[in-house]
Amino acid sequence: MPKAPVTFILNDAEAALFVDAGAPLIDVLRRGVGDLTPKHGCGQGTCGACTVLIDGKAHLSCLTLAETVEGKRVDTTAGLAGGPQLHALQDAFIEGFAAQCGFCTSGMLMAAKALLDANPDPSRAEVIEAISGNLCRCTGYEPIVDAILTAAARTQRRAV
């Protein structure tokens, strides 16, 4: 199988490697560079567990070809925290018990981050829409929606 060189920014660090032609980004992230935070769920784009940000937009890494991130920025949950300081979303998820089994958490966090980066003060309906592609089997979604709204409110207070 032919290999293609791919260079991209992963959570503020350059990543450069050769990838198999047609390899999904999730495999390159997990096996190629060792970032295990995107979860391999359904492998068909229906669960959202593998959500990452590519140039600030949410993408399913199981459906994204690794070659397509050449020269782009890829952000995963591993890059959310700033050293020991958790991201506002991570704090709110912990405090609101929005992460129970944890399987959907990384995808939910990245979908929520994409939303808050684009719209720092979303409505409840906008949050629900933003995470609608992410499946959760434990929380019933309400703690997740509440955590995202809490993080948005805290971020808004800090900005003032």
Image (tube, helix red, strand yellow):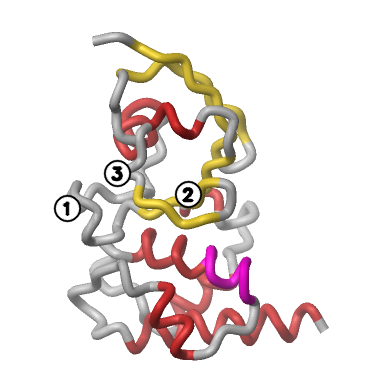
Q: Quadrant of the C terminus?
A: bottom right
Q: Residue at x 64, y 40 (%)?
A: 12
In the rendered structure, the answer to whether residue 128 lies left or right of residue 75 reads: left
Look at 51% across and 46% down and name the residue there: 54
Quadrant of the rendered image containing residue 35: top left
Provide the residue span drawn in magenta.
113-119
Q: Is residue 110 left or right of residue 73?
A: left
Please, what is the three-letter code of the amino acid marked with disc 3? Leu
Q: Quadrant of residue 136?
A: bottom left
3 or 2: mark nearer the eye: 3
The spot of residue 16 in percent (x, y) is: 52, 20
Find residue 41 and report its horizontal and vertical position in percent. 20, 53
- Helix, strand or loop at label 3? It is loop
CA neighbours of label 1 inside 10 A, class few (<14), some (14 to 19), many (20+): few
- The residue depicted at 24 percent of the width and 53 percent of the height is 45
Residue 115 colored in magenta in the image:
yes
